[in-house]
Image (cartoon, grey):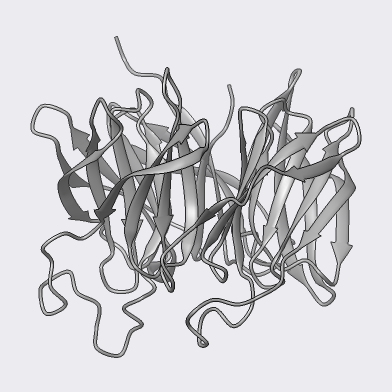
């Protein structure tokens, strides 16, 4: 029986005249990617979130504007995309956007401005601004952490987890939906100075495990939930045994402390993958052990430059290689637990985000 074709959406650094958001179809059987259509008129919609609302598909993204940034909602249809709502403010410097578990809120993290914004999803799928939290302070590295740099905001089990690269901390909030408010749930999680937590993901099951990828130290931190908070279970190097002089190394002119980019779990949560950029151009695979700890398996090149993000579709990984204007496909072989680059590729202007579109 042939595998079902998968429709995906991709965001990037494209300019307004270009298709900065693209829609494509992936054929898992043939490992082929085909561009279908796109959205023009946006400036650098580098991250996307998608919601299925009744029969409608809603896409949430943002763009950089003269005022700072705008958060935008689109209704996606067979004839194209129609704008549902737009919120423009000088305090928005967007880099990440997500839909809440209950599909009632949208969270946007602003790297450039060091804050998060909460939006209410309206009946038609559009957004209404509800709440902003502004962070203050600095980290250990004056060149990269002179101010807060909020890089991720996502919900698990009724709590919002926010990663701030500039402050080396994960902030955790209980979500008060009735009052559209965020209530701090303890002190959060502190990281080693200069490590720079960037993105995170939660594994479910009987025991919740939080996995955090650091951008500057290129490590994966695994935390288990306890009655007193989140306890460190494991700290895994995303490039173990690879010295700076070896093949996957960044050039001498590059910032070797800006490597980690995206972190994803396989659908069955048995494997974890992270992408590495600025010279490494690779994805590393880990096996997730029964206790939540990680065992390094392999590191494979993505076939492009600067893999800012990737999506996991069964045993296939679709990578967005920003600085080569290229989307590539890798395959994970579960029998040998190895990653390999396929011949499939698709051109797109500076791709930076990959997400699945609902059926």
Coordinates of residue 23 in the picture (x, y in percent): 56, 43
Coordinates of residue 29 in the picture (x, y in percent): 28, 26
Residue 115 vs residue 87, the one in the foreground = 115
Is residue 64 depicted above or below 317 in this figure?
below
Coordinates of residue 206 in the picture (x, y in percent): 42, 17
State the residue lying farthest toward the bottom.
Answer: 253
> Residue 310, can we see it?
no
State the residue lying farthest toward the front.
Answer: 228
Residue 307 in the figure: left or right of residue 166 = left
Is residue 20 depicted above or below 287 in this figure?
below
Image quarter where the C terminus lies is top right
Residue 245 in the figure: left or right of residue 138 = left
> Residue 260, can we see it?
yes
Image quarter where the N terminus lies is top left
Which quadrant would residue 30 be assigned to in this image? top left
Which quadrant would residue 135 be assigned to in this image? bottom right
Residue at image location 58% in from the left, 67% down from the top: 13
Residue 51 vs residue 137, the one in the foreground = 137
Coordinates of residue 140 in the picture (x, y in percent): 49, 79
State the residue lying farthest toward the top.
Answer: 1
Residue 167 vs residue 49, the one in the foreground = 167
Is residue 1 depicted above or below 209 in this figure?
above
């Amino acid at each position: 029986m042939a595998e079902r074709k998968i429709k995906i959406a991709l965001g990037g650094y494209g300019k307004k005249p270009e298709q900065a958001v693209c829609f494509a179809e992936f054929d898992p059987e043939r490992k082929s990617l085909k561009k279908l259509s796109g959205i023009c008129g946006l400036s650098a919609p580098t991250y996307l979130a998608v919601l299925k609302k009744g029969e409608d598909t809603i896409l949430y993204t943002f763009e950089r504007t003269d005022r700072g940034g705008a958060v935008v909602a689109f209704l996606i249809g067979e004839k194209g995309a129609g704008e549902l709502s737009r919120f423009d403010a000088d305090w928005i410097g967007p880099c990440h956007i997500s839909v809440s578990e209950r599909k009632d809120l949208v969270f946007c993290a602003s790297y450039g401005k060091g804050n998060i914004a909460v939006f209410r999803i309206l009946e038609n799928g559009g957004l209404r601004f509800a709440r902003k939290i502004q962070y203050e302070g600095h980290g250990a590295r004056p060149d990269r952490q002179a101010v807060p740099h909020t890089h991720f905001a996502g919900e698990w089990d009724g709590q919002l987890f926010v990663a701030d690269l500039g402050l080396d901390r994960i902030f955790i909030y209980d979500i008060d939906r009735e009052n559209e408010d965020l209530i701090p749930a303890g002190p959060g999680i502190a990281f080693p100075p200069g490590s720079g937590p960037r993105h995170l993901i939660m594994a479910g099951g009987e025991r919740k495990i939080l996995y955090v990828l650091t951008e500057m130290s290129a490590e994966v931190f695994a935390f288990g939930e306890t009655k007193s908070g989140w306890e460190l279970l494991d700290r895994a190097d995303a490039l173990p045994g690879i010295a700076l002089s070896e093949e996957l190394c960044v050039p001498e002119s590059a910032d070797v402390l800006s490597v980690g980019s995206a972190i994803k779990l396989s659908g069955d949560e048995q494997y974890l993958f992270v992408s590495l950029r600025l010279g490494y151009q690779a994805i590393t695979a880990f096996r997730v052990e029964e206790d939540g700890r990680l065992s390094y398996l392999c590191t494979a090149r993505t076939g492009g430059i600067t893999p800012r993000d990737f999506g996991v579709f069964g045993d296939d990984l679709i990578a967005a290689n920003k600085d080569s204007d290229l989307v590539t496909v890798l395959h994970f072989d579960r029998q040998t637990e190895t990653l390999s680059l396929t011949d499939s590729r698709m051109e797109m202007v500076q791709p930076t985000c990959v997400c699945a579109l609902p059926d």
